[in-house]
Amino acid sequence: MPGRTLIVNADDLGMTSAVNAGIAATFERGIVTSASLMVRQAAAQAAVDYAKEHPALAVGLHIDLGQWDYENGAWIVAYERCDQEDPAAVEREARAQLDRFRELTDRDPTHLDSHQHVHMSEPLAGVAARMAAELGVPLRDSGIRYEGSFYGQNGKGESFPEAIGVEALVALLRQLPPGVTEIGCHPGMEMQGESSYAQEREQEVRTLSDPAVRETIATEGIHLASFAEFARRS
């Protein structure tokens, strides 16, 4: 199937040193081309230092308004950075994170997305769309097809390792439609309980770095790209 371009984007850059290590490994030895930075997390500066040493890694902004974890049959708020029912507060926080991204990196992001996909609904949806238009960069699942099935848990936070195995990723690659697709991923290494998505991150590193995956991209004639190729063209 001709005319297929793939962006492999790692979310949560800067969350922890273990996540940074997983993203670095899958960029250097695997198929990751881009990553999304959480500017308010503890390992953000280390992530930026790595990115400056590896300029081929496209780095976007992972807008982080909070996190929810599934526990005891319900979604529990782990943290919130603002009142997410207040459009003005959401816009202030999103733009403050963009300002922080610029302070850390000395440039604009190559793309925008959000932690736990909160930009898919209001009030962040409109804010993120305006910011992406102002920057001239892609916004996740707006113009570029987003494929989110490479994820190792179900909707209740239960592990689903089959979805992030080599066979699953190879099958996904073979079925890519024409045009540009982003596959999201969440690699990490030697996780120490910093995330409810932990052992799955380690499996993702192995899968994304497997030679069979790279070979499939080559044999299928898929062009592996980064978000930098699409910034200021959206």
Image (tube, rainbow, N blue to C red):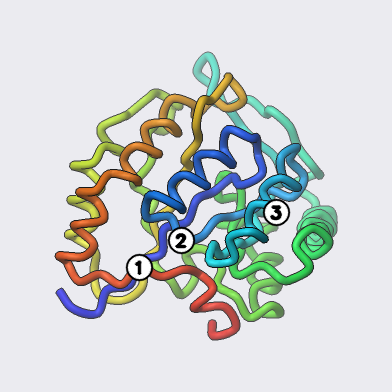
Q: Is residue 45 above or below residue 110?
A: above
Cβ atoms at labels 3 and 1 below 8 Å apart? no
Q: Is residue 19 above or below residue 216?
A: above
Query: Disc 1 versus disc 2: distance between alpha carbons?
Result: 8 Å
Task: Residue at the far top: name it.
Answer: 72
Residue linked to disc 3: 48
State the image coordinates of residue 129 (x, y, percent, origin top left). Answer: 64, 71
Residue 66 in the figure: left or right of residue 83: left
Residue 32 in the figure: left or right of residue 207: right
Q: Which mark is residue 33?
A: 2
Q: Decide: few, some or many residues near mark 1? Use Cα within 10 Å; few <14, some 14-19, many ≥20.
A: some
Is tag 3's residue or tag 1's residue first in the polypeptide sequence? 3
Query: In the rendered structure, which amino acid carries the disc numbered 1?
Result: Leu
Quarter the C terminus occupies = bottom right
Circle 3 sits in a helix, a strand or a loop, which is it?
Answer: helix
Query: In the rendered structure, which amino acid carries the disc numbered 2?
Result: Thr
Query: In the rendered structure, which amino acid carries the disc numbered 3?
Result: Val
Q: Which mark is residue 224?
A: 1
Cβ atoms at labels 1 and 2 below 8 Å apart? yes
Is tag 2's residue or tag 3's residue first in the polypeptide sequence? 2
State the image coordinates of residue 8 (x, y, percent, origin top left). Answer: 41, 58
Query: Disc 3 versus disc 1: distance between alpha carbons?
Result: 23 Å
Dividing the picture into quadrants, the one containing residue 42 is top right
At a point 64% along the width and 59% down the height, the residue shown is: 53
Is tag 1's residue or tag 2's residue first in the polypeptide sequence? 2
Residue 223 in the figure: left or right of residue 1: right
At a point 27% along the width and 44% down the height, the residue shown is: 210
State the image coordinates of residue 147 (x, y, percent, origin top left). Answer: 36, 56
